[in-house]
Amino acid sequence: NNISFTDTMPSGLEVVSVSDGTCGLGTVTESPADTISVSGVTLLTGTTCTFTAVVRGTTVGLKNNTSGPVTSTQTPNGT
């Protein structure tokens, strides 16, 4: 429970918008324009959290993006 992660876009990408999706009581936000934050998500057994993020390239070229680690108050983290 209390599942969270942050995804900061690499240089040349910006977040246009995000939807709250199906993340229960948690929140999905974009702020500043290059960061997606998911926080406070609680999932019951067998459920998922799904949201949509629209991201735009601001420079030419390949961009690689990896989110930060997923954390929770469950044990162990990241699973």
Image (cartoon, rainbow, N blue to C red):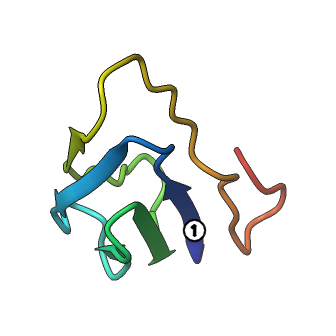
Q: Visible in this render: residue 54?
A: yes
Q: Secondary structure at mark 1?
A: strand
The answer to whether 52 is drawn above or below residue 23 in the figure is above
Q: Which image quadrant for residue 5? A: bottom right
The residue sitting at 43% across, 46% down in the picture is 46
Q: What percent of the width, then of the height, locates residue 20?
A: 20, 68
Quickly name the residue at label 1: 3
The quadrant of the rendering that contains the C terminus is: top right
The residue sitting at 37% across, 51% down in the picture is 47
Q: Residues within 10 Å of mark 1 (few under 14, many from 20)?
A: many
Q: Residue furthest front?
A: 59
Q: How many marks?
A: 1
Q: Visible in this render: residue 42?
A: no
The answer to whether 16 is drawn above or below residue 42 in the figure is above
Q: What percent of the width, then of the height, locates residue 45?
A: 49, 54
The quadrant of the rendering that contains the N terminus is: bottom right
Q: Nearer the viewer, residue 10 or 18?
A: 10
The residue sitting at 73% across, 75% down in the picture is 73
